Image: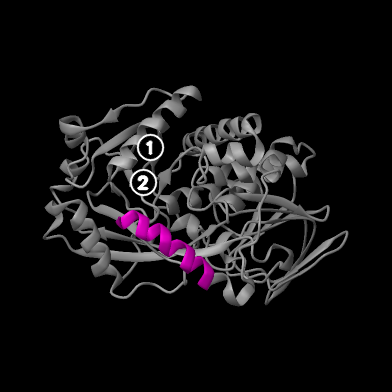
Amino acid sequence: MSEYYSATRRLAVNPSPLTGDQRADVAIIGGGLTGCSAALHLAERGYRVTLLEAGAIGAGASGRNGGQVLPGLACGQLKLNQLIGKGAARHVWDLSIEAVELLRHQISRFAIDCDFVPGYLHAAVKPRQVRELAETQAELADLGYPATDLLTGANLRARLASPRYQAALTDPVSGHLHPLNYTLGLADAAIRAGATLHAHSKVTAIVRGAKILLRTAQGQVTADHVIIATGAYLAGLMPPLAGYIMPVGTYIIATEPRDDVPALIPGNEAVADLNFVLDYFRRSPDQRMLFGGRVSYSTLPPPNLAAAMLARARAVFPQLASARAEYCWGGFVDITMNRAPHFGRIGNNILFMHGFSGHGVALTGLAGKLAAEAIAGQAERFDIFAKIPHRRFPGGALLRTPLLLLATSWFRLRDWL
């Protein structure tokens, strides 16, 4: 089946492949949200920027995800407190709020047609999760977050017409959008600001030195600084980063347009549950149900994927008994051991940002801005993220994936129980 976002893209951004030799102040590897944001902010500062993308712009996680815009980190604020201390964790939280504000500002500033809708529901499947939502509500209040409501009973059913959930926490700051159109909008803005973008230009080698050389099949770029923003598609390109992230497959279907879809989520919020292997879903502008979930830690897509995803959607919304899956697609997100993003440096002139762990639609845009600030000599905000400690996944290249599968099986079992 084809992919819904590509079928509904509104902007043609198709840069040519790199040929020959180029010189740049900053070269960026990766044409997703992080890379396009960095290109935009660097170009606006007057740097000569060349971005190299292995496929089409937005072809990776940036253009294929669930489109859910969230503050905070995937690891949660409590875990972040343990990792870097409460004061630094609060600073990261404030930066994540800035990330959502930046996303909304960029949409307005560049008139990006990406269907942004505010509003979010965090949904509880079981009593334990209801208690977790109450704790989250208290934590958000302590952080000065706008008022949230814990919905139960008739109030819940009025906002989410599903028998599956016991409670939901409203979230007025978060929201959802068309991720590919947003990514293409940032890429277009970067080009207009003076950045040079090249699609279908996979970097095959990085030669480190005072000047860095990036080689592709048909050309090369020499740059003073390099930003690595490849996400789950890093592979073996930079050995010092090997093992810090794992690619995890996640999948989405889009039903046919249906008259009953607006009544399923009357407020048009994005929704996700609290399970480790979660379901996430939202309405599209043409009244399809976009339903995501399932994961593959082996990087192999599950069998009969569209049928399995549709069965999950019907378990949440029995009203979709007659629905069809007109689109079905997937892709890889980059996760870290602690589910916090991994920022840092290799030598003096290579920056990297990856490992957003499925929580990066907003934060990736800020990551690009912080990288631009760091290259311009204002690294304090970048370094707040760089101080988050990280460990490699255990097991080495051969056993890393089997060990991850074993560990996540426990969390799946916990969800089922």
Quadrant containing the C terminus is bottom left
Total count of labels:
2
Looking at the image, do the residues carrying marks 1 and 2 touch, with CB atoms under 8 Å apart? yes
Q: Position of residue 167 (x, y in %)?
A: 26, 37
Q: Is residue 252 above or below residue 305?
A: above
Q: Nearer the viewer, mark 1 or mark 2?
A: 1
Residue drawn at x 47%, y 68% is 405
Residue drawn at x 57%, y 51% is 338
Crowding near the residue tagged with mark 2, few <14, some 14–19, many ≥20 C-alpha atoms within 10 Å: many
Can residue 21 be seen? no
Quadrant containing the N terminus is bottom left
Can residue 41 be seen? yes
On the image, which quarter does residue 177 sit in?
A: top left
Q: Is residue 370 above or below residue 197?
A: above
Q: Position of residue 110 (x, y in %)?
A: 51, 39
162 displayed left or right of 199: left
Residue 274: numbered disc: 2
In terms of depth relative to the viewer, which is nearer, 130 or 200? 130
Residue 76 shown in magenta: no
> Circle 2 — which element?
loop
* Amino acid beneath label 2: Leu
Residue 414 shown in magenta: yes
Residue 132: numbered disc: 1
> Circle 1 — which element?
helix
* Amino acid beneath label 1: Glu
Crowding near the residue tagged with mark 1, few <14, some 14–19, many ≥20 C-alpha atoms within 10 Å: few
Magenta span of residues:
402-417
Q: Position of residue 383 (x, y in %)?
A: 72, 41
In terms of depth relative to the viewer, which is nearer, 195 or 287? 287
Residue drawn at x 29%, y 36% is 168
On the image, which quarter does residue 16 sit in?
A: bottom right
